[in-house]
Amino acid sequence: MRTIVLLIYISLLTSFLQAQDSLAEFVYGNHELDSFVLDNLVRPDECLKYGIDFNIDLSFVVDTLGAVAYVNIIYTEPTFKKWSEKFLEKIDALKPYVEQEVIRVIKSTSGFWFPSEINGKKEKQIFHYKILLRTPEFYTKGGNFRNTGMDGVNAPYYIPFDVPYTNPIKYYNLGVKKLTQKKYFIAIKYFQHSIELGNQSVDVYYNLGSALLLNNQKVEACEAWKKALELGDDEVKELIEKYCVKKDGKW
């Protein structure tokens, strides 16, 4: 009887320990990876102009530090409307660009991952990922049109492979979006990238400081707010006085 009870206990303990194992996970959940990819991907105007979408299946490795490596495209399948068939040669030209863009964005997620853990030890993991890159549409009484953001006639034939998104305002706006969603870690990264791209507004430093504080990084938050103060943001003084330590008579 004791043997049976002991075996049951061992079985339950083994199940509990196995339950502690975890797969690699993107910060705030793997569903947030979709949002990150779609927010950061540069879509060719040709996709918008000719109504071309792409299903992409890929794999990559998340290492023990949460870094990403060995991004591999498994397959890319274009989808398009019947009226787009006459543009097949354009689809072939767009495919390698879209693949390189997806690889660029996935690589940029390094540091955004919680690594896999097995038996309490961090391990590398191959992560499989599928995404549909669908171009936006808008509707009017007269029909359905692709939202090209332009006249749909003079769109460039392609976007060069070596042109990533370099608009600091885009990343500032993404930071505000993630800040309101309480996804502070990603908001911080977006604000910092906006600054790296040349954004020196008081707003970006004010919001960076807010995101850092909410992410329990008070020292870094104070540094961001001090920069906002140097740039002429008097409203930030109240936050500095409340959260920051004064040294040698200076904040």
Image (cartoon, helix red, strand yellow):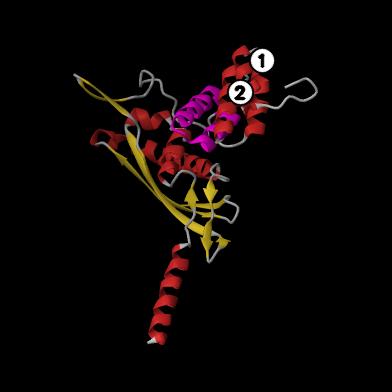
210 sits left or right of 226 in the view: left
Badge 1 element: loop
Residue beneath disc 1: 231
Task: State if disc 1 and disc 2 touch (CB < 8 Å).
Answer: yes
Q: Is residue 190 above or below residue 79?
A: above
Residue 163 in sight: no
Residue at image x 53%, y 66%?
A: 119
Residue beneath disc 2: 205
Magenta: main secondary structure: helix
- In magenta, the rendered stretch is 166-192
| Amino acid of disc 1 | Leu
Q: Is residue 215 above or below residue 61?
A: above
Residue at image x 66%, y 15%?
A: 231
10 sits left or right of 234 in the view: left
Report if residue 72 lies within the magenta region. Answer: no
Residue 246 image point, x, y percent: 73, 24
Residue 186 image point, x, y percent: 52, 36
Between residue 240 and residue 137, name the one nearer to us.
Answer: 240
Between residue 159 and residue 3, name the one nearer to us.
Answer: 3
Q: Is residue 238 above or below residue 119?
A: above
Where does the C terminus fall, quadrant-wise?
Answer: top right
